[in-house]
Structure formats: structure tokens, C-alpha cells
Image: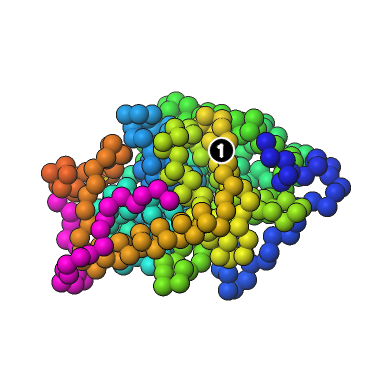
Amino acid sequence: MDTSFEESGAAASGPGPAAWPAADATTGAVAADAVVGETPAPAAVPSPSTAPDAMAAPGPSATGAAETGESAGSATAATAAAGDAAGAVAAPSGAPVPRPATAPTSLSPSRAGDFMQCPLLYRFRVIDRLPEKPSEAATRGTLVHAVLERLFDAPAGERTAPRARALVPGQWDRLRASRPELAELFADDPDGQRLARWLGEAERLVERWFTLEDPTRLEPAERELFVETELESGPRLRGIIDRVDVAPTGEVRIVDYKTGKAPRPEYAEGALFQMKFYALVVWRLKGVVPRRLQLVYLGSGEVRTYDPVPADLERVERRLRALWDAIREATESGDWRPRPTKLCGWCDHQERCPEFGGTPPPYPLPVRARESGGVPQGRMGAD
Ligand code: SF4
């Protein structure tokens, strides 16, 4: 465990973490709550394949939903805050209300992952904004993230596993109240047994966190930090970072919680890409390359870290520019190709997908005449 970001104890009297450079109007870095409010925006819950975990996930046949599907809660908040949330918003009744189609203006890690996985899926989510059903796995991820975030409201010495577990029911009530569409998750569970099991799984994930990190020795500089920056000539990059720790030396660690299992090495690049995305945004905003990127996998009880160097982040920037060029080309041409993979099993849009005999809805944006030599929609290579 890297202790350089830890306090010397709950009753620490040392210098504590260094100050995180203040956000200002030019950086756009502000606390997430200031953007999305105490209540998460009522965006549709991303399906499992929306999760950053799934950006290069092995697919359901390999590991199942636990590995591919347990979305970062902040991913939901991030897309909501970033305005590129998939699907439709929910009316007070809980019924989805389609939002008008618009051309994309920004990129989050989740949506970048969508395009890399399948351009047509990206179109359905970002351009058409088709509604998607909430999933138990993604919603559990959101719930667990809320609990871990709230726990840091308590004094360091009181951040215990029982206290965290006790937060689960209340945070679930709060989440359900703010997103009426979640009512359908357990609509067919009249005796509440499935809900009780689901809440128990959330509690176990929360408890496992205490085997991986010690919150009594952590004093995060930021929790659920909304960040946004615009690369020269686009795109605008946005997202929400689960936690930022700043060591007394000023070194920065970016932490992301995953409620799924750690992926096998050959599929680890997707989650790491998300972290490098955040590191690039922090570098651009604050002028500091994070010393450490840390993924905390609650599903399997593992911590994965990566220490980036500027060349890593420059590669990610080039990759994002190329990705954005391909997205802009597809937006203008209306040419969104399906790319079938094992992850299609998690896709809510098979009935509209040509790969499954469906027909996409009419393209809602103006289309220009196709020129030769467009930007290819091939899979983005590893950076
Ligand atoms: S079902 Fe179709 S739209 Fe969905 S991910 Fe597969 S290829 Fe893409």
C-alpha cells in the first residue's frame, strides 16, 4: 500500500496533505456537488457496457456481469454532469422522456469507450439519446460510490466498516428518490428478497474496501470532482474523478473505485485508459502530472496502480484527438457502423441494430454529402 498519501493517523498532528491548487473559472474544475447538486441528475443508468470497466471488457461469456457490469457510480454522475448522458431523462412519473438529438460537443471516458466499442452504440446513446433500462449492477455501483463518498463526511476516527455499512440503506433511499426510474429494478420483487440480497451485496462491497484502503488515514483533497478542459481544436473533455489525494509533498493521486472484478491483464487497458484520460485533464487544468493512478476493485479485492509520465498522457491526447475526428466525421456523414462483439449481449439496442436484423431510427441530424477518404471507425489501438 502506498502510504505517502496517508495521514500519520486519525489523530495526526503533522502537516497533513498539501493544498490542492484552487479551482477557478478558467480551469472549470469544481466539486461535483456544485455541478450536479446533492441529488444526482436523473439520467438513465448506463447499461453494463457503458461502464469504464467494460471499455475493453471480456464480455459476458468470459466473466459475467460482475466483471463487466459494475459501473463506477461516478460514471453516471459524470455523464449527467457532462451533458452527454446516455438515453433519456425520466419524467416525475418515471417514464422516460426522449431529449432532442444534438451533435456531440464533449467527450467523457464512458462515451469514448462507447465509440471504441461500437460507433452505432455511441450514436444511439449520444445522438439519438435512446432510453435504456436501469441495471442492478450499474445501480449498485452508484450506490457503493455514494456510500464511500459520504463516509468521508465523518471524522477520520469514525470511518469504520460498520458505519459505512449502515449508510447503505439511507443512500439507497436517497438514490431511489432522486431517480424514479429505478423503481422498475425491483418492481417484480413483492416480498423484497431480491432487494435484500442486492443491498447485502452492496454492503459486502463496501466492507471489502476496508481491506484495501484505510479511510481513517486518508484525507481526500477532492471527492467526486467534476473536471472539464478543452483540448486545442477540441474536444472538450469532461468527467468526474472519484477521489483525489494530495500528499504533503504536493504529489497527486487519482483514485477510482470499481465495484466489479479486476480485469485480466489483456483487458486492463480500458480502465487504465479512463484513468489516463483523467490524468490528462488534471495535467491540463492544474499543470501537474498525477504521480499515481489507482484503481480499487471492490469486486475482487484488488488494487491496481500505474504511475504515468508525460509521454503517456501525450499519447492519450493524440488518441482522443483521433477519436474525436472519427466521431465528428460520423456525425456529419451519418455513417455509424455497428461493431458486434461479445458485449452486444449487454446492449439495450439489439432490436434497432442491423447486426441483429433491426433498423436504426431515422438519423436525426443533418447529413452532408459523403466525401472519399473519411476518418475510419476502426478500433482505436492501445496507446
Ligand atoms: S448490438 Fe449492435 S449497436 Fe449494440 S453494441 Fe452490438 S453492434 Fe453495437
Task: Kindly indicate the quadrant of the structure image that contains residue 91.
Answer: bottom left
Give the image location of residue 66, x and y in percent.
43, 32
Query: Residue farthest to the right?
Result: 13
Query: Residue farthest to the front?
Result: 311
- Tell me what residue is drawn at x 58 percent, y 36 percent: 303
Magenta segment: does it hold 369?
yes
Q: Is residue 69 visible?
A: no
Residue 188, above or below 46: above
Numbered range of the magenta stretch: 359-383
Give the image location of residue 237, x and y in percent.
46, 63
Q: Is residue 252 visible?
A: yes
Task: Kindly indicate the quadrant of the structure image that contains residue 103.
Answer: bottom left
Q: Quadrant of ligand 1?
A: top left
- Tell me what residue is drawn at x 39 percent, y 63 percent: 321
Quadrant for the N terminus, please. Answer: top right
Magenta segment: does it hold 263?
no
Q: How many marks?
A: 1
Check disc 1 and report its element: helix, strand or loop: strand
Q: Amino acid type of disc 1?
A: Arg
Q: Magenta region's main secondary structure? A: loop
The answer to whether residue 342 is left or right of residue 105 is left
Task: Kindly indicate the quadrant of the structure image that contains residue 214.
Answer: top right
Of residues 101 and 320, the one nearer the viewer is 320
Residue named by callout 1: 304
Give the image location of residue 380, x and y in percent.
34, 52
- Tell me what residue is drawn at x 48 percent, y 32 percent: 261
Q: How is the image coloured?
A: rainbow
